[in-house]
């Protein structure tokens, strides 16, 4: 019912619902920290203020890092053509090396070989085809870039106005989200108690149990995913710095940010890291590739098991599918609702449906009843002529 209502109201009240939901999620994530401060003999108002001061400091640090990243993006745009120009002769050298392989090996690999005019066998003009493909690729890229620049120059005023309007709207949304989350966090216990008053008395124990277990799964996933993002960002930055990849901070920031969706961070960061590594040396590019491979293995076999343990146990594939379905149905609101709904379904399935007697009792084989002597005699009498 709740999903149907949200679907009907997604256009009319989408902004308000999104702000309220994001505010509640922030309050939900911060509530354990407030509870910890309360156990240290601090009142809830003071605990909320201290938590938001900590959040403000994190926001300042994040703004500084974002400014650094934006500044480095211009440098990235300047270095990218050099990286592509460095990559082009290396690709051609690789094609030339392939052409010089023995003919028998090339035939086994499936390459077509024909005699050249001077009688020496040669591969069909691979290098010419490769050069043509590279030339076509860079010509198309240059055309797209030129069209983009012309559009920016023609529509610069409109884009500037839209950008300023977007920044203002985003700032207003952030202010509303912080205010809503502060009210949610301050009265978090009251909201929980008020919700339970609308639940019938006979269903309250089950509802409390379901919400508690769902909250443990969702809270553990969200807090754990934030910690994973920090660990992966630090791993990316240290590794890319050791590999002497330019703009290591910028690449690490975006790769860690996209790692909120499992396994997406290494995919996003690998291509620019390898391209920029080529501007330094092939070994730097190879080191960048190794950094993302090792980081992905650390995430799979070390970070995620240590951070999540057995509290969430939501498979990454389930997370990705849930987010894609949420985006398709409700947009940003669907992204925010995807993980809580998956956690709720997981709790209901594992704790209630799969623990019912019908699922736990083994299926006993049905044995045919043995015939008694009286039944055997009566059957024999019926068959006598």
Image (spheres, helix red, strand yellow):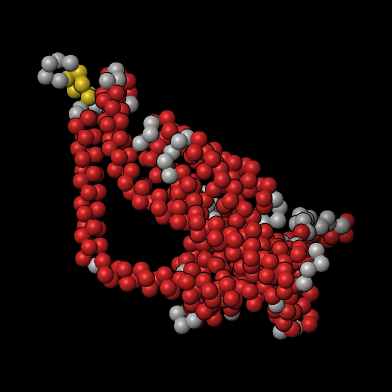
In which quadrant of the rendered image does the C terminus lie? bottom right
Q: Position of residue 325 (x, y in %)?
A: 49, 64
Q: Which residue is nearer to you in this view: 71 or 234?
A: 71
Which residue is found at the position 76% from the left and 64% from the top? 37
Which residue is found at the position 49% from the left and 81% from the top? 13
Q: Looking at the rendering, which quadrant does residue 247 occupy?
A: top left
In which quadrant of the rendered image does the N terminus lie? bottom right
The answer to whether residue 297 of the structure is visible from this angle is yes
The answer to whether residue 218 of the structure is visible from this angle is no
Which residue is found at the position 69% from the left and 75% from the top? 186
Q: Which residue is nearer to you in this view: 8 or 35?
A: 35
Q: Position of residue 253 (x, y in %)?
A: 49, 51
Q: Could you tell whether 175 is left or right of 370 in the image? A: left
Which residue is found at the position 58% from the left and 59% from the top? 58
Q: Which residue is nearer to you in this view: 119 or 154?
A: 154
- Relative height, residue 199 to residue 335 (above, below): below
Q: Could you tell whether 286 is left or right of 234 in the image? A: left
Q: Position of residue 350 (x, y in %)?
A: 70, 61
Q: Looking at the rendering, which quadrant does residue 47 occupy?
A: bottom right
Q: Position of residue 59 (x, y in %)?
A: 55, 62
């Amino acid at each position: 019912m709740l999903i149907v209502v949200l679907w009907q109201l997604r256009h009319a009240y989408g902004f308000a619902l999104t702000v309220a939901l994001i505010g509640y999620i922030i309050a939900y994530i911060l509530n354990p920290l407030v509870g910890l401060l309360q156990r240290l003999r601090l009142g809830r108002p003071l605990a909320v203020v201290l938590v938001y001061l900590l959040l403000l400091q994190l926001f300042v640090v994040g703004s500084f890092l974002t400014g650094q990243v934006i500044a480095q993006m211009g440098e990235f745009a300047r270095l990218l053509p050099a990286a592509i120009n460095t990559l082009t002769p290396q690709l051609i050298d690789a094609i030339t090396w392939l052409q010089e392989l023995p003919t028998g090996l090339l035939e086994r690999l499936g390459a077509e070989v024909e005699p050249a005019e001077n009688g020496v066998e040669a591969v069909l003009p691979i290098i010419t085809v490769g050069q043509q493909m590279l030339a076509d690729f860079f010509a198309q890229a240059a055309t797209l870039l030129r069209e983009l620049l012309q559009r920016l120059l023609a529509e610069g005023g409109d884009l500037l106005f839209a950008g300023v309007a977007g920044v203002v709207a985003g700032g207003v949304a952030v202010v509303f989200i912080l205010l809503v989350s502060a009210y949610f966090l301050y009265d978090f216990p009251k909201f929980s108690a008020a919700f339970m008053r609308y639940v019938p008395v006979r269903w309250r124990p089950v509802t409390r149990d379901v919400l508690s277990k769902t909250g443990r799964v969702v809270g553990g996933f969200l807090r754990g995913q934030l910690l994973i993002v920090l660990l992966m960002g630090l791993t990316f930055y240290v590794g890319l710095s050791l590999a002497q990849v330019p703009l290591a901070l910028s690449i690490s920031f975006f790769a860690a940010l996209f790692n909120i969706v499992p396994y997406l961070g290494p995919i996003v960061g690998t291509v620019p890291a390898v391209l920029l590594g080529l501007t330094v040396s092939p070994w730097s590019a190879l080191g960048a590739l190794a950094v993302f491979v090792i980081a992905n293995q650390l995430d799979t076999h070390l970070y995620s098991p240590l951070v999540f343990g057995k509290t969430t146990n939501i498979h990454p594939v389930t997370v990705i599918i849930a987010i894609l379905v949420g985006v398709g149905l409700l947009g940003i609101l669907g992204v925010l609702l995807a993980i809580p709904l998956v956690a709720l379904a997981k709790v209901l399935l594992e704790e209630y449906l799969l623990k019912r007697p019908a699922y736990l009792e083994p299926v006993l084989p049905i044995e045919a009843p043995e015939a008694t002597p009286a039944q055997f005699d009566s059957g024999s009498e019926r068959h006598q002529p």
